[in-house]
C-alpha cells in the first residue's frame, strides 16, 4: 500500500467514525418520530451539509469531497443504518452531479457543481414517467427546439427531492434530429426555483409512500416550459445521448442502493440480536432457543455477503473497471437481503415487531423500495444475465 493510500484510508475512517457517532447519537433516537410524521429532517440535512455529504462524490476541484466509491458506500451504509431516507436525500442529487461531472461541458460543471457540493443547490434526477419505468426508452416527455430554446411538455413521476431541487437532470425526447439512433432521448439540466411552481414546471402532486418517508417524491408536470439550448447536457453533441448517459450514472445509484440495503440489513440485525438477548420465553432468553440462534446465524451470514459484494462492486468502480455485473449483483443481493432481514427481525420481535414503538416496522416498510428503485430485481437479473451470456 502506498503512503497516499494509507492517508486516504485514514481520512475515510475518520469520516465514517464521525458519521457513526452522529447516527447513534442523533439519527437513531430521532428518526422514527420524523418518519412516522412524514416530516422533512431539516436539521439532519443541515448537518449533512456541514459534513460535506452533498459533495461526497463531486471532485475537489469543484468543492466536493471526491470520495472513492468504497468510502461513499460506507457513508451510505451508515446513514441508512440510522434512517434510509437520509441516503435518499443525497442519492438523486449526486446522480445529477455525476451526470454533469462526467458528461457536462466545462461551463455546465463550473456553473452547477460548486453550489451542489455545498448542498445550497439541490439536484434531482427525473427519468421515470407514469407509463414508463423499467422500460425507460419508452418515455414520452418531449423537448421541441424553438430557436435558441427547447420547449418541454410532459409528466414525470417519482421525482425524489423534486420540490426542493434547484436543478433537474431531466430526460426528454427530442423528436427531430437523432444522430445517435437512440430515439433522441436527451438529458436537460433544467434550472428551477425550489418549490411547487417555476415557469412552466408544476409539482402536481406529492406521492404518499408506505416507507422512505420524510423526503418528498413527487409528480412533476411540464407545460411549455422553455429551457435554453445550452442546457442540453454535454452541449449540442448531447442530443440523443441522454439515456445511455443516465444508465451509466445509475451505476453509482446501484452501488448506493446496495449500500442502503446493507445499512438497513445491519440495523435489522442489530435490533434482532439485542431483542433476542433480553426477551425471555420458556424460562430463558429467546436467543438461547436454537431456532432463534440459527436465524441470527443466517442473518449475519447474508449481511456479511451483501456487504462484501457491495464493497467489491465499489472497488471495481474505483479501479475504473466495468461494474454492470458486480453492481447489478450487489444491488440484487443486498436489497433482497434487506427485505428478508427486516422480516426476520420483525418475527424475532414477535408482537412488538408489529408496533410502531420499535424501529423494525420501519425497516420492514423501507426495505422494499430497494428492490424497486434504480432498476427492479428483475431488471438486475436482465443486466446480470446479459453480462454473463454476452458473446465474445
Ligand atoms: C419511492 C420511489 C422513489 C423513486 N425515485 C425516483 C427518482 O428520483 N427518479 C426517477 O426517475 N425514478 C424514481 N423512481 C422510479 C423507479 O425507478 C421505478 O419505480 C422503477 O424503475 C420501476 O419502474 P415502474 O415503477 O414503472 O415499474 P414497471 O417498469 O412497470 O415494472 C412493473 C413490474 O414488471 C417487472 N418488469 C418490467 N420489465 C420487465 C422485464 N423486461 N422482464 C421482467 N420483468 C419486468 C418489474 O420488475 C416490476 O416487477 C422511484 C420509485 C419509488 C417507488
Image (tube, helix red, strand yellow):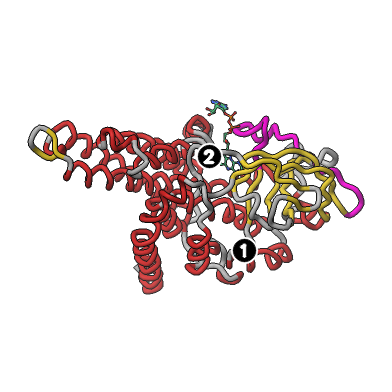
In this image, 225 relative to 83: left or right? right
Above or below, 195 against 63 in this view is above
The magenta span reads 127-148
Q: Which residue: 40% across, 57% down?
A: 27
Q: Nearer the viewer, residue 347 or 157?
A: 347
Q: Report if the beta carbon of the residue with label 2 is closer than 8 angstroms to ligand 1.
A: yes
The residue tagged 1 is: 116
Marks 2 and 1, how far apart in space? 23 Å
Residue 131 in percent (x, y) is at 67, 30
Spot the residue most to the right.
Answer: 147
Q: Nearer the viewer, residue 294 or 164?
A: 164
Q: Secondary structure at mark 2?
A: loop
Q: Nearer the viewer, residue 37 or 177?
A: 37
In the image, which disc is placed on residue 373? 2
Magenta span: chief secondary structure: loop
Q: Nearer the viewer, residue 183 or 265?
A: 265
Spot the residue most to the left.
Answer: 283
Mark 2 or mark 1: name the one nearer the start of the chain: 1
Amino acid at each position: 500500500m502506498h503512503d497516499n493510500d494509507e492517508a486516504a484510508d485514514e481520512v475515510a475512517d475518520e469520516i465514517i467514525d464521525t458519521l457513526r457517532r452522529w447516527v447513534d447519537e442523533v439519527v437513531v433516537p430521532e428518526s422514527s418520530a420524523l418518519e412516522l410524521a412524514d416530516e422533512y429532517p431539516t436539521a439532519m440535512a443541515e448537518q449533512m451539509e456541514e459534513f460535506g455529504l452533498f459533495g461526497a462524490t463531486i471532485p475537489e476541484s469543484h468543492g466536493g469531497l471526491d470520495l472513492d466509491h468504497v468510502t461513499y458506500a460506507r457513508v451510505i451504509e451508515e446513514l441508512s443504518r440510522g434512517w434510509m431516507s437520509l441516503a435518499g436525500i443525497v442519492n438523486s442529487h449526486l446522480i445529477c452531479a455525476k451526470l454533469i461531472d462526467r458528461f457536462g461541458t466545462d461551463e455546465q460543471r463550473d456553473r452547477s457543481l460548486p453550489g451542489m457540493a455545498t448542498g445550497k443547490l439541490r439536484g434531482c434526477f427525473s427519468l421515470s414517467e407514469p407509463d414508463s419505468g423499467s422500460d425507460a426508452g419508452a418515455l414520452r416527455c418531449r423537448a421541441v427546439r424553438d430557436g435558441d430554446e427547447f420547449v418541454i411538455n410532459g409528466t414525470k413521476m417519482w421525482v425524489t427531492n423534486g420540490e426542493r431541487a434547484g436543478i433537474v437532470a431531466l430526460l426528454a425526447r427530442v423528436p427531430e434530429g437523432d444522430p445517435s439512433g437512440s430515439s433522441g432521448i436527451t438529458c436537460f439540466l433544467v434550472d428551477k426555483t425550489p418549490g411547487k411552481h417555476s415557469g412552466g414546471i408544476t409539482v402536481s402532486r406529492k406521492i404518499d409512500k408506505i416507507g422512505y418517508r420524510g423526503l418528498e417524491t413527487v409528480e412533476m408536470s411540464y407545460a411549455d416550459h422553455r429551457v435554453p439550448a445550452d442546457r442540453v447536457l454535454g452541449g449540442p453533441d448531447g442530443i440523443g445521448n441522454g439515456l445511455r448517459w443516465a444508465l451509466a450514472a445509475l451505476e453509482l445509484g446501484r452501488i448506493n442502493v446496495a449500500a442502503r440495503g446493507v445499512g438497513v440489513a445491519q440495523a435489522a440485525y442489530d435490533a434482532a440480536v439485542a431483542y433476542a438477548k433480553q426477551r425471555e420465553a420458556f424460562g430463558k432468553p429467546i436467543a438461547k432457543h436454537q431456532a432463534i440462534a440459527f436465524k441470527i446465524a443466517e442473518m449475519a451470514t447474508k449481511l456479511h455477503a451483501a456487504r462484501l459484494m457491495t464493497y467489491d462492486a465499489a472497488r471495481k468502480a474505483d479501479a475504473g473497471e466495468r461494474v454492470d455485473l458486480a453492481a447489478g449483483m450487489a444491488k440484487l443481493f443486498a436489497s433482497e437481503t434487506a427485505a428478508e432481514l427486516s422480516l426476520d427481525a420483525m418475527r424475532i420481535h414477535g408482537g412488538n415487531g408489529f408496533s410502531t414503538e420499535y424501529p423494525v416496522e420501519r425497516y420492514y416498510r423501507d426495505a422494499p423500495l430497494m428492490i424497486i428503485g434504480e432498476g427492479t430485481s428483475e431488471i438486475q437479473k436482465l443486466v446480470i444475465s446479459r453480462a454473463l451470456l454476452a458473446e465474445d
